[in-house]
Every structure is written in C-alpha cells, then in structure tokens.
Amino acid sequence: MKISRKISEGILGEGAFDVLAKAKMLESRGVKVIHLEIGEPDFDTPEHIKRAANDAIMRGETHYTPSAGIQPLREAIAEYVGEYYGVKVDWASQVAVSTGAKQAIFATLCSIVEEGDEVICPDPGYPPYADGVRFSGGKPVFVRLRPEDEFRMTPEAVSEAITSRTRAIIINSPHNPCGSMLTREQVKGICELAEDHDLWIISDEIYRGIQFDDFEHYSPMTFTPDRVVLIDGFSKRYAMTGWRLGYAVAPPEILKNIVKVLNVTTSCPAAFTQWAAITALRGPQDFVKWVADTFKRRRDIALAELDKSESLRYVRPTGAFYVFVDVSRALKKLNLDSKGFMEWFMEKRQVAVLHGSSMGPSGEGWIRISFGNSDENVREGCRRLVEEVDRIVKS
Ligand SMILES: Cc1ncc(COP(=O)(O)O)c(C=O)c1O
C-alpha cells in the first residue's frame, strides 16, 4: 500500500528532537548526558502563571474554545502587541492563538503559499519554515546567512533571491540557531523590498526580549504592519514550552485562512493554558528580564570557554540562547559531517549538541550549542568540546 512520499521524503522535521531522543537512549543505558541540544529554557514556569492555570482548571475551563482562541486572551495579545510596536491591532480580525508558535508558522504558510510559490527562508534557520513551505506545495528559497555578515539576513541577499514566484519572506530576529539580530536598516530594507515586490513578511519574534549588550530589537511591524504576519508565543520568554501556546497577528484576509488551518488541525489550544497566558501577558514582567539576564550570563560562560580553543570559530550571539560554532577543522580530521560529529561527540564525551546541517544546507560544518542548561553544565559542555576538538585538530 502506498504512503505519502511528500511526507516521507520531502519533510525533514526538527533535528533537535531526534538528538534529544538519541541522548535519552544513551541515558537509559545509565550514561549521564549534558544536554546542550534542545532549544528550551530549563527554568520552571513562574508561579503566578501556574496558579492561573490551576484556577482555570478548577473553574471548569476544560472545554473546547473558539479555534482562534478565547476572546480575553486575543484582546490581551492585541493590547500587548499594539503597545509594544505602537500599532493598532484588532483582536477579532487580526489575532489567532495557536498550539505553539510552531503551529502559527505552519498555519501561516498553509494560508499564504500555493503550488509552486517560493518563500525566502534564512539558511541556517528554524527547520519548520522550509518544511511548512514544502508542505504547502511551495519551494523554500534559502538565503545564506554568512558569518562575514554576522549571520544577519541582508536586504542585498534577499533582493537576489526574489523572483516572480516569490510570495513571502521569513525573517527571524533574534535568530535560531545563530543568535544574530537584524539591524534597523536591514529590517527597513527588507520591508522596502516587500513593498516593491508586493510580498508578505512572516516575522518570527519568539526570542524578542532575550537580547544582550544593548542590542535593540527591530520589527517589520513598525514599518509595514499591513503586510506582516507576526509570529510569537509564550515558550521562551515565560518558560512555557510544554504548554504549547503561541499566536499569529496578521492582516484580516490571512487571519481567516490561518483560523481555518487551526480549526482543522487542533480545533483550539487547551482552554486552561489560554487563561493562564492572560496572566503571563498582564502580570509582572520581571521574569522575562531575569530570563534574558540568565541567558546573557550563560552566553558569557560559553564564550569564555570557547575562546580557549585554537580551532573553533563562532560569531558572538547578541540574542536568543544559542551559539553557532564552526567545527569544520575537526570534521576534516575526523572525516565526519556535522551529524556524524554530533553522534561521535555524544558517545565520546556525553554532551549532546545539535548538528548544523539540521538547520539548513549552509549549517554543515557547524554545531549549535543551547544555553538551556545550568551555568555549570554549559561551562562543562563547552570545556569538553574545546578539549576534544583542539586535541583532534592538533593530532
Ligand atoms: C525560531 C523559532 N520559532 C518558533 C519556535 C516554536 O516555539 P513554540 O512552538 O514552542 O512556541 C521555536 C522553537 O524552538 C523557534 O526556535
């Protein structure tokens, strides 16, 4: 009997979850692994948010909700987004709540892309972008982010990738996996291209607020809000990955499609998590600052270790909680690709990292280190990496 080749051959999935499964397998054999592979904060969700979820359950908020989410949360998102970006957001026609930002990305791509359309994706970049485009029958067009440009997506590179089939440009700042952030001129330049060629911009801002060294965050929402789909969520800023809650803020004509996709895929996110999310947005925000400060400290710890290496290279991350590290000199000596290196390093030194090739074609030769672990584990994981790579390169 036949199965879909579009899925079995065309859709790649998110590599970090495969690495996590491998690490768990090793742990089931009694080996202690340092996890630097998965992109999630290791902190617990703040008490006041957990309490709000408990209260909601006890109140009986345990039923289906409208597919676009409950009205009070959509209102809270409209207010929060409107205030932050200085734009007017209408909750009823522009806001939809999703089961994680990942679903909002998927629903947006399904809502925009038709057979044969092209969507510009950052490379390296978050894998569900390209998979979502493929799923919708479109073609991801990768714009290579170069270490020489500090892994930022330049308007020049985007301009070169635009064709008559281009439908949308995806940007992600702060960026996974590189930790880079777009400058004001770059965001503005990309918005101008979108205007000139009548394109949508899908702006994934899930790491906004986790930024260091006084780097400012810029969004197309402040330049061309009527052609932007803003993707955001609660996973990273509020340490709510397992709650699976995100949202899209979109022009009304796209939002209608997005809600249809949410409707046919999950009906709605869990009701009590939606009620708790209102508390996340409207409650005290000091946790978000603490998250950013903690990741900055860990970034500094990681870089201090990596700086001891004579053979590793990286671009200093200014946001998110990753550093992308060039291990190509070790790969050459070992005759391995980045996936082979990830497996080899996990077996040899019990540290799980993410192979760069899982983040797009130009991620080959690199690995991603996540700071979603304790200061001690980030330091020790990086120390083992430096020790092993330098030994191999020198041998
Ligand atoms: C760039 C980016 N966007 C979106 C997401 C999805 O977040 P979630 O589905 O947990 O809200 C992630 C998660 O790793 C991410 O790295």
Image (tube, rainbow, N blue to C red):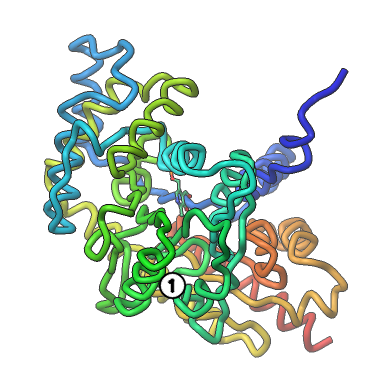
Question: Horizontal and vertical percent for residue 6?
Answer: 74, 36
Q: Going by the image, does 66 lie left or right of 19?
A: left
Q: Going by the image, does 191 lie left or right of 122?
A: left
Numbered label tally? 1
Q: Going by the image, does 191 lie left or right of 388?
A: left
Seen in the picture, residue 117 relative to 312 is either above or below; the reply is: above
Find disc 1 in the rendering and name its residue: 180
Give me the residue at 34% from left, 47% from top.
Answer: 232
Q: Quadrant of residue 155?
A: bottom left
Quadrant housing the N terminus: top right
Viewer can see residue 353: no
Give me the residue at 20% from left, 28% from top.
Answer: 51
Q: Secondary structure at mark 1?
A: loop
Question: Horizontal and vertical percent for residue 61?
Answer: 24, 14
Question: Horizontal and vertical percent for residue 142?
Answer: 61, 64
Label 1: how many Cα within 10 Å (few below 14, some 14–19, many 20+): many
Pick the front one: 74 or 308: 74
Q: Going by the image, does 3 lie left or right of 45?
A: right
Pick the front one: 329 or 104: 104
Pick the front one: 156 or 42: 156
Q: Amino acid at mark 1?
A: Ser
Quadrant housing the C terminus: bottom right
Give me the residue at 25% from left, 31% from top.
Answer: 50
Seen in the picture, residue 140 relative to 385 is either above or below; the reply is: above
Q: Any atom of ligand 1 within 8 Å of the CB at mark 1?
A: no
Give me the residue at 16% from left, 54% from top.
Answer: 286
Viewer can see residue 50: yes
Seen in the picture, residue 49 relative to 63 is either above or below; the reply is: below
Question: Horizontal and vertical percent for residue 154?
Answer: 46, 77
